[in-house]
Each structure stands twice: as structure tokens, then as C-alpha cells.
Image (spheres, helix red, strand yellow):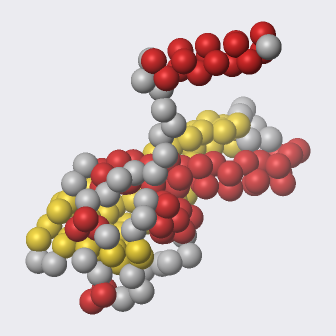
């Protein structure tokens, strides 16, 4: 009985403060059928963007002429740079980056001019754990792509 009262009090406090789960973005009706135009449909960003659009209730068109809006991905790049090296001139720290440039058009009208989003994360490197560090880099790239998709979806929701 006490546990139920505590749970009820906690739910009332959370509801009273305005807390709610983020959920999927609400997009304008102009984006109801969207075509994602890109040179490479096999990138982390493209896959995550298509999934986010689908979650938001947008039908992703297979062809440009079937769509009411076009999200044009002009640049979708990822890579890494050396941040620091040891006294023996071996890398000790890397920076993983992900850059996306996109624009949104509806017919002849430009809804969003080309915008570039770049996110970076760094990680330490140890040649004794080469496989683990390779996996860490993959996880960071996937996380960066997801973070950029969140930014893009918030910008699309503001239209």
C-alpha cells in the first residue's frame, strides 16, 4: 500500500512539473511525403534519418516526383584525426567527426537553406586493445549520426 502511495505521489510530482517524454517530432503537413536525396543511401546518418522520419509519421517516398518535400543531403562525411601523440610518436588520442550538410525544398520553394552540422567526439587510443578501440570508434560514429539526426529533426519540426 505504501509503495503504491509513493508511486502515485511521484507520478503526481512529475506530471505537475511539466515533465514528459520527448517522443517523435511533429513535422509540418508539407513534409507528409518526403524524399531523401543523397548520393549514398548506406551511411549511418541516412539510415537514422529515414527511421526518424518514419517514426514522426512521414512517408518516405521512393522517388522525388512522388514527394511533397525533399531533404537534400549534400554532404555526409565522417572520419578521424589524431589529437595527441606519445613521446614515441604513436597516437594516444583520436577525434572522430561527422559532418552533414542538408537543405529542404518543397516544390520550387526553399524551406531550409543549406545548413552544415558537425559534431566531434574524442577517445583515447591503446594499441594493446586495437579491436576494442576500433569498436569504440564505430559506436562513436553511430552516436554522432544519431545526434545529428536529432538536430536535423528539430530543425524540420520548426518549419
101 and 56: which one is in front?
56
Residue 78 higher or lower than 96, as above or below: below
Classify residue 37 by image quadrant.
bottom left
Whether residue 110 can be seen here: yes
**Residue at (47%, 67%) from the top-left corner?**
54
Measuring from the top left, give residue 145's x and y in whole percent: 52, 55
Q: Quadrant of the N terminus?
A: top right
**Residue at (30%, 87%) from the top-left corner?**
66
Q: Quadrant of the C terminus?
A: bottom left
Residue 6 higher or lower than 46, as above or below: above
In the image, taking residue 132 as reference, residue 86 lies left or right, namely left
Residue 116 higher or lower than 14, as above or below: below
In the image, taking residue 82 as reference, residue 67 lies left or right, namely left
The residue sitting at the right extreme is 128
Residue 74 higher or lower than 85, as above or below: below
Measuring from the top left, give residue 45's x and y in whole percent: 50, 63
**Residue at (42%, 23%) from the top-left corner?**
18
Q: How many marks?
A: 0
The residue sitting at the left extreme is 108
Whether residue 118 can be seen here: no
**Residue at (46%, 51%) from the top-left corner?**
24
The residue sitting at the top extreme is 2
33 and 94: which one is in front?
33
96 and 39: which one is in front?
39
Measuring from the top left, give residue 32's x and y in whole percent: 31, 70
100 and 36: which one is in front?
36
In the image, taking residue 150 as reference, residue 125 lies left or right, namely right
Measuring from the top left, give residue 6's x and y in whole percent: 70, 12
Amino acid at each position: 500500500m505504501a509503495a503504491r502511495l509513493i508511486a502515485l505521489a511521484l507520478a503526481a510530482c512529475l506530471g505537475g512539473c511539466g515533465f514528459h517524454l520527448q517522443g517523435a517530432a511533429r513535422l509540418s503537413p508539407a513534409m507528409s511525403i518526403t524524399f531523401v536525396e543523397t548520393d549514398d543511401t548506406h551511411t549511418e546518418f541516412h539510415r537514422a534519418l529515414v527511421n526518424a522520419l518514419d517514426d514522426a509519421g512521414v512517408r518516405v517516398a521512393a522517388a522525388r516526383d512522388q514527394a511533397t518535400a525533399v531533404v537534400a543531403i549534400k554532404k555526409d562525411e565522417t572520419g578521424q584525426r589524431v589529437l595527441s601523440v606519445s613521446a614515441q610518436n604513436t597516437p594516444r588520442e583520436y577525434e572522430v567527426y561527422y559532418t552533414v550538410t542538408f537543405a529542404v525544398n518543397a516544390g520550387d520553394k526553399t524551406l531550409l537553406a543549406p545548413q552544415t552540422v558537425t559534431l566531434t567526439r574524442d577517445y583515447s587510443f591503446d594499441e594493446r586493445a586495437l579491436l576494442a578501440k576500433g569498436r569504440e570508434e564505430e559506436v562513436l560514429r553511430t552516436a554522432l549520426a544519431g545526434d545529428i539526426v536529432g538536430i536535423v529533426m528539430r530543425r524540420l519540426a520548426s518549419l
